[in-house]
Image: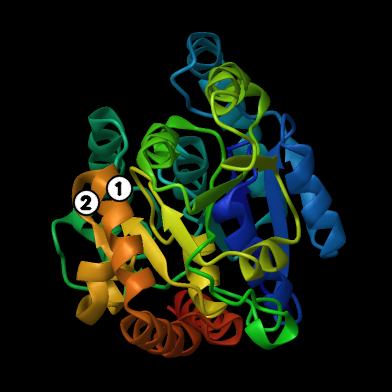
Amino acid sequence: MRKKIIYIDEDARYGGPQHRMILVAKNLKKFFDITFLISNDGNKIFKKKLKENKLYFKEIKITRLTKDFNTLLNYIVFFIPELVSLLIYLNKVKPDIVQVNSTPHFKALIAASILKIPTIWVLEDSNLPLIIKLIFKILNKIFRPNLLVTSNIVRDYYLNKKKFSNNLRKIYAPVSLKVFNPQKYKIKKFNIKKIDILMIANLTKIKGIEVFLKIVEIAPKNFYFTLCGGYTQNQKKYAKTLMLKFKKFNQKKLNYIGHQDNISNIISKCDFLICTSLSEAGPMTSMEGICMKKPLITNKVGIVNDLFKNYKKFMVVENNNPTKFINNIKKLSLVPKLRKKIIKKSHEIAVKEFSLEKISKQYQNYYNFIIKN
């Protein structure tokens, strides 16, 4: 009899965590019955992607944890009723595993744990408010779920470099090498007279957009920037303030293209990929860029320190310093041999570590281990 796995996502947005689990679920649905349990306030893009990939999902009334006052108030007021709804649904379906797809999804974790359903709690952030970290510590101590982190930096943030074990695993986010395959595209030939720099990020404060704009402001005239990313209804106010700032730049200097589906094609047209995020486990778009043989310059987040230690002085910018972003891009632009070496070596590592087939197999093995034990 096929085992049932439920992915619970209390967040209405569509981003890296949702994309990651869609990729994995699509690969594993031939082995398991997988259901996505999502907020009925869910982003249309998330639902669209689930339908495109023929993944079963059910919507439920559930309020996400956020700093927005009205939403936070609803979160508190409806906490118990929504927890009860989760308990009723899970008790009816009786899954073999519940996977809680982000740290602040406390209702899902509590409901599954009360019903004594084997639970995997996926930890992805490394810069959440201290209250979230405190609640994590309390719930982890009470319920002892299986923990899954997507990079060492996340483990260190929550668990102080605790050793990996059966109930603490690290599985990176996957990249579809069939999609992010540089041989499928006419890769832009590098021209130092026009250096195209791409950042892929939703318009939220955690993505460090203000730092990105500072980089654009101080960049040399031959640097041209593209920003790709959308925003949800809850992010609309902040997005509007950013739009006003975008208008201060010539569109050729900074081109904001909003949310896009064909990310691999967009990456193929850039010379450098940058990431100014304040907190990331991956991020997936950076790894996708490396798989497309693009050099990455990133703030000290995610998995670069895990895997690219030999090249991190060229790839990693401490403290999100805009000047150092510019200097690193200049250095790699002016030294083609070094740039090509970093592209070649980082691509080899990425293809080996992030392939969708490898990551899916790791999830499959982990699920089977938990079910058997």
Helix or strand or loop: what does disc 2 sit on?
A: helix
* Mark 2 residue type: Tyr
Labelled disc at residue 366: none
Q: Residues within 10 Å of mark 2 (few under 14, many from 20)?
A: some
Quarter of the image where one finds residue 52: bottom right
State the image coordinates of residue 177 (x, y, percent, origin top left).
63, 82
Instruction: Return the x and y of residue 210 as percentages of the image width and height.
Output: 40, 31
Asked whether the residues under the numbered discs 2 and 1 touch, taking CB atoms below 8 Å apart as contact, a structural biologist would say yes
Q: Residue at x 46, y 47 (%)?
A: 221
Q: Disc 1 residue type?
A: Ser
Q: Residue at x 40, y 53 (%)?
A: 124
List x then y, in percent, for residue 239: 58, 24
Q: Does 103 sit left or right of 80 as displayed?
A: left
Residue 135, position in %: x, y? 29, 34
* Rendered view: 292 above or below 93: below
Q: Quadrant of the C terminus?
A: bottom left
Q: Specify whether residue 236 is in view.
A: yes
In the image, taking residue 65 as reference, residue 134 lies left or right, namely: left
Disc on the earlier residue, 2 or 1:
1
- Quarter of the picture holding the N terminus: bottom right
Q: Nearer the viewer, residue 2 or 133?
A: 133
At 47% across and 24% down in the image, what residue appears? 66
Residue at the disc numbered 2: 157
Residue located beneath label 1 in the image:
126
Q: Nearer the viewer, residue 112 or 13?
A: 13
